[in-house]
Amino acid sequence: MGGAVSRIKLWHREDIDGFFGLFTNNLTNLLVMAGLLNISIGIPATITYGKILPAVGLSIFASSFIYSWMAYGLAKKEGRDTVTALPSGTSVPHMFLIVFLIMGPVYWKTGDPYIAWFAGLAWGFVEGIIELSGSLIGTKVRKVLPRAAMLGSLAGVSLTFIVMTPAMQTFDLPYIGFISLVIIFLGWFGKVKLPFRIPVGLFAIIIGTIIGWMTGNMDMIAVTESVKQVQLNVPTFSIERIIDGFSAAGPFLIAAIPLGIYNFFETIDNIESAEVAGDSYNTKHALIADGSTTILASLFGSPFPTAVFIGHVGWKEAGARIGYTWATGLSVLVLTWLGLISLLLTIIPLEAIVPILIYIGLIIGAQAFQHVDMKYAPAVILAMIPWIANWGQNIVDTAFTSADTSALEVGYAAIATAGLEYSGLISLGTGAIIIGMIWSSILVFIIDQNFKNGAVVCLVGTFLSYFGIIHYKEIGIGIGLETAISYAVVGIILLIIHVKQNTKKLEEL
C-alpha cells in the first residue's frame, strides 16, 4: 500500500485530453458570460473584463485546486493512482439567471452598472450561504434518493444544456465541427491510435483550427485587435460592494433559495456519478467547497456561483486523473487576469472545440442507463423530461427576445393555439433538477412497490410546490397551492395503497 501511495502523481500524460475538454468547457462558459454581461445587458467592458471575469477566474482556480487536493487525498487513502478529480467551474444555468433576473433588471432600472454588479454580488453571497447549509443535509439526502433519480436528472441536463447547443454549433460549420467530432469518436469510443500519439482532444482542436484558417473562417485582423486588449487585471476584495448591493437586490433575493438548493442537488448528483465511476468523494466536503468558493467569488467581484460540473465519468473514460483539474484552474486564472479569453477564440474556431462537450454529454447519458437496474429505465427517462421542458422554454424565450418581444406580450393563449403549451413548459421546467428527482423517485418506489416512501416524496413535492420553490417562477406562501394539492392527493393515494398492502400481509399471517 505504501509503495502505491508514493507513486501518486499530480500529472499524467492522459490529463492532457481531460485538460483540453474541461478547459474548453470553462472557456466556452466565460465567453458566453462575457457576451451576456457586455452585449446582452450592456455592462461596460471595464467592469466585465476588468472586474468580474478576473474574479470568476479566481473562484474557478480556487475550486479546481480544492478538488485536486480532494482527489490527491482520496488517492493516498485508497493507495491508487487512478483517481479522477472532480471537474468544476461556474454553474451555467445560474449564469443566465443572475444576468437576466438580477443584474439586467437592476441596470435597466437604475442605469448604474455598478449597482447592478453589486446586486449580483449580494445574490451570489446569499446563494453561497445556502450552498453551505446544504452540506449539513447533503449526505443524508444522497443516501435516500434513488440512483435512477440522480443519474436520470444528470442525463437530462447533459442531453439539453451540454449536448444540444454544441451539436447545433458543430453542424453550423460541419466541415470543421463534424470532422472534429468524428476524430473524437474514433479516439475515445473507437480506441483508434492517432498520429504521434497526440491526445484525442488536442488532435481534434488542431485539425479543426487548421481547417478553419484554410477555409477563411478565421480573421487575422481580429487576432491583432485582440492582442491589443491584453492587460493585467487583478480582482479586489470588498465587503462593501455586497452590502451596497443588498438594497438593490432585496426584492430578488428570495429567488436565491431555490437556486442554492438547485446547486447543492447538482453537486450531490455529480458526487453520485463519480462514485458510480469508481471515485467515492465526501459529499459534505464537496458541498462546503462549492459554498465557500461561491462566497469567495462574491467577495472578490464575481456574482456567479461555482459548482461541481457533470462529466466526471467522461473525463475518467478519457484517462484524466488529478492534473487536468488544477491545470484548468491555473489556465483560467491566467486567461482572465491577462484578458486573453477573446484572443483565443480569434485563433481557434469554436466549432473545433465544442464537439468535446458532445462526447461528455453522451457518456453521462449512457451512464444513467448502464449503472441502474433496467427495470428503472422508465424512471431515468422521467427524470429527463423536466430538463427538456426547461431547455425548450429557454429556446422559445431566446427567440422572442431576439424579436424584441416576449411570451407574455405575444400571449400564452396565442402560443397555445400554435400548438405549444408555453405555460406548461414553465411549470414543468422551473426547478427541473428537483422536479426530475421527485418524479423519478416516486416512480422508482412505485416500481419497487414501496408506496410508503413514494408518499413521503409526494410530501416533499407538496411542501416545495406550496412555497413556489418548484414549478413556479415566484416564491411565497401559497404560491403553488394547486400543484401542492395535486402532490398531496397522489401521496394520499400511495399511502392508502401502502396501508391496504400491510393489512393484507397481516391477514395472511
Image (tube, grey):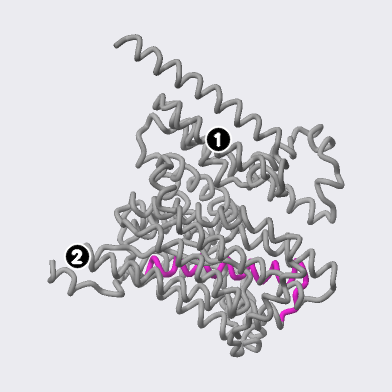
Mark positioned earlier in the residue sequence (1 or 2): 2
Q: Amino acid at mark 2?
A: Gly
In-image side of 42 versus 308 (left or right): right
In-image side of 225 versus 452 (left or right): right
Are the residues tagged 1 and 2 within 8 Å (C-beta)?
no
Asked whether residue 258 appears in the rendered view, the answer is: yes
Task: Give coordinates of residue 254: x percent, y percent.
Answer: 69, 57
Task: Give coordinates of residue 106: x percent, y percent.
Answer: 79, 67
Q: Callout 1 environment at 10 Å: few (<14), some (14 to 19), or many (20+)?
A: some
Q: Callout 2 environment at 10 Å: few (<14), some (14 to 19), or many (20+)?
A: some
* Residue at (74, 39) in percent of width and height: 422
Viewer-closest of 21 and 63: 63
Nearer to us of marks 1 and 2 is 1
- The residue indicated by pointer 2 is 79
The image quadrant of residue 185 is bottom left
- Quadrant for the C terminus in the image: top left
Q: Amino acid at mark 1?
A: Leu
In-image side of 276 versus 220 (left or right): left
* Residue at (57, 41) in percent of width and height: 435
* Residue at (41, 17) in percent of width and height: 501
Query: Residue extending furthest top?
Result: 508
Work out whether 284 lies above or below 454.
below
Q: Secondary structure at mark 2?
A: loop
Task: Give coordinates of residue 125: x percent, y percent.
Answer: 61, 69
Highlighted magenta segment, given as a residue range: 16-45
Work out whether 240 lies above or below 481.
below
Asked whether residue 216 appears in the rendered view, the answer is: no
In-image side of 486 versus 373 (left or right): right
Residue 384 drawn in magenta:
no
- The residue indicated by pointer 1 is 459
